Image (cartoon, helix red, strand yellow):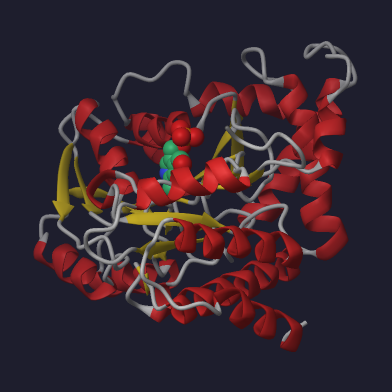
């Protein structure tokens, strides 16, 4: 039985904790989404999201979870039988591949070990080998939420350019947007997919596409069936300040508040630095415990979550269950191929030093309770790092 006193610690890598300010912003009467006041809200939100995506291109907001925005990216730009190139970085790349396959696309899925991001050299070689330019899109998950590995999009862009290939670049930023530096325009990404429930600190239910001019041009000729997700009708309505269907009104209030928190108070760079600092403190704790970080390339460590491997024979879900029951803290489960082998600590969104120390304290106590061989001192290592690097 979970102790009901105090706040639940929701330290999964999203949905993340929703700040009280954002909760209060949602707690408002619903307004007429076709009334006169609504257009200003729409315009303000699109401008704010352009700043978060670092783009001046079109951004659309769907009343949908991230999976909807994944689908939207594909059905707006591609045609049945088109070839796309993906890399098996983890569970979310695997799921996005599934959607592409279900839609009738031919997916070249480069196998991976779930401990590394997309290899830019391997990408370049694949594209060079496609001399007839049959690959229509490269689809990458920026931050693999299942593994805590962040692929290097700037290097991926360079690899595509070096190959001379014209494929579209589509990037899923669902667990990086608002937590890890991301530049839609500078990296010439064609479609960026985002979601509300992680770095943006909102409940689940909104998702986004940022759309380059090249992707918009592709949408004029693509023939995959596309109705609800249609960019053209969304962009046309948005230009008047409205939506082609009922938007998630109260979530939009929440988005206005979280954008204000991210952009106006601290600025995005400060938000990214905070995430990096907490990720580093977490990794120091993991090393002090004598446990292994799933991500094997330090250049690809995720700033929004850390996935931790347990020694062979230890059950990560049992550890999570003990921590939930004794300390009322939810940690991320191992997904897909790493189920039972890893647990994930989310350190993203509305999160500060003391949240991290509470989280690591719960893990350290749980490791002892579960009888898992480890060294004490993880929390101390994190404390030293945080205190020494304010
Ligand atoms: C990287 C990534 N992509 C896609 C998704 C799917 O989004 P949703 O569950 O909101 O549909 C998730 C969800 O956690 C994710 O982390």
Q: Quadrant of residue 41?
A: top right
- As drawn, is 349 to the left or to the right of 325? right
Task: Name the quarter where the N terminus is drawn.
Answer: top right
- Residue found at x 66% / y 84%: 385
Q: How many marks?
A: 0
- Residue found at x 73% / y 67%: 353
Please determine whether, in this image, residue 7 is positioned above or below residue 101.
below
**Picture quadrant of ligand 1:** top left
Residue 191 in the image: state x and y as whole percent: 45, 46
- Residue found at x 74% / y 42%: 7
Residue 47 in the image: state x and y as whole percent: 74, 45
Viewer-side residue, 123 vs 275: 275
Residue 56 in the image: state x and y as whole percent: 65, 52
Viewer-side residue, 37 vs 28: 28
Residue 226 in the image: state x and y as whole percent: 38, 20
- As drawn, is 128 to the left or to the right of 282? left
Q: Quadrant of residue 4?
A: top right
Q: Is residue 206 visible?
A: yes
Task: Name the quarter where the C terminus is drawn.
Answer: bottom right
- Residue found at x 35% / y 56%: 342
Q: Quadrant of residue 143?
A: bottom left
Viewer-side residue, 102 vs 88: 88
Viewer-side residue, 222 vs 18: 18
Q: Residue furthest bottom?
A: 388
- As drawn, is 23 to the left or to the right of 287? right
Please determine whether, in this image, residue 265 is positioned above or below residue 287.
above
Q: Is residue 240 visible?
A: no
Please determine whether, in this image, residue 198 is positioned above or below residue 202.
below
């Amino acid at each position: 039985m979970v102790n009901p006193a105090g706040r639940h610690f929701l330290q999964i890598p999203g949905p993340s904790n929703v700040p009280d300010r954002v909760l209060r912003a949602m707690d408002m009467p619903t307004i007429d989404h076709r009334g006169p006041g609504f257009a200003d809200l729409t315009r303000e939100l699109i401008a704010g999201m352009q700043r978060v995506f670092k783009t001046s291109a079109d951004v659309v907001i769907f009343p949908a979870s991230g999976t909807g925005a994944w689908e939207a990216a594909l059905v707006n730009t591609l045609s049945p039988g088109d070839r796309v190139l993906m890399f098996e970085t983890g569970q979310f790349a695997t799921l996005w591949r599934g959607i592409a396959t279900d839609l009738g696309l031919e997916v070249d899925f480069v196998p991976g070990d779930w401990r590394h991001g997309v290899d830019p050299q391997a990408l370049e070689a694949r594209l060079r080998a496609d001399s007839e330019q049959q690959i229509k899109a490269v689809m990458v998950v920026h931050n693999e939420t299942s593994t805590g590995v962040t692929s290097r999009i700037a290097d991926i862009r360079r690899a595509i350019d070096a190959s001379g290939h014209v494929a579209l670049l589509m990037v899923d930023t669902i667990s990086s947007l608002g937590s890890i530096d991301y530049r839609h325009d500078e990296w010439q990404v064609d479609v960026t997919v985002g979601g509300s429930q992680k770095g943006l600190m909102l409940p689940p239910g909104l998702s986004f596409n940022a759309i380059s001019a090249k992707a918009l041009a592709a949408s004029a000729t693509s023939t995959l069936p596309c109705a609800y997700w249609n960019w053209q009708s969304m962009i046309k309505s948005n230009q008047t300040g409205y939506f082609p269907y009922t938007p998630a009104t109260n979530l939009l209030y929440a988005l206005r508040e979280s954008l204000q928190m991210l952009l106006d108070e601290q600025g995005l760079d400060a938000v990214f630095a905070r995430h990096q600092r907490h990720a580093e403190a977490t990794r120091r704790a993991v090393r002090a415990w004598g446990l292994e970080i799933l991500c094997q390339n330090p250049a690809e460590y995720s700033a929004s979550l850390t996935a931790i491997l347990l020694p062979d024979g230890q059950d990560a879900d049992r550890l999570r269950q003990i921590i939930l029951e004794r300390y009322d803290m939810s940690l991320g489960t191992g997904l897909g191929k790493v189920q039972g082998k890893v647990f994930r600590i989310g350190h993203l969104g509305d999160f500060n030093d003391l949240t991290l120390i509470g989280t690591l304290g719960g893990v350290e106590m749980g490791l002892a309770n579960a009888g898992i061989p480890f060294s004490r001192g993880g929390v101390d290592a994190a404390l030293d790092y945080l205190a020494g690097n304010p």
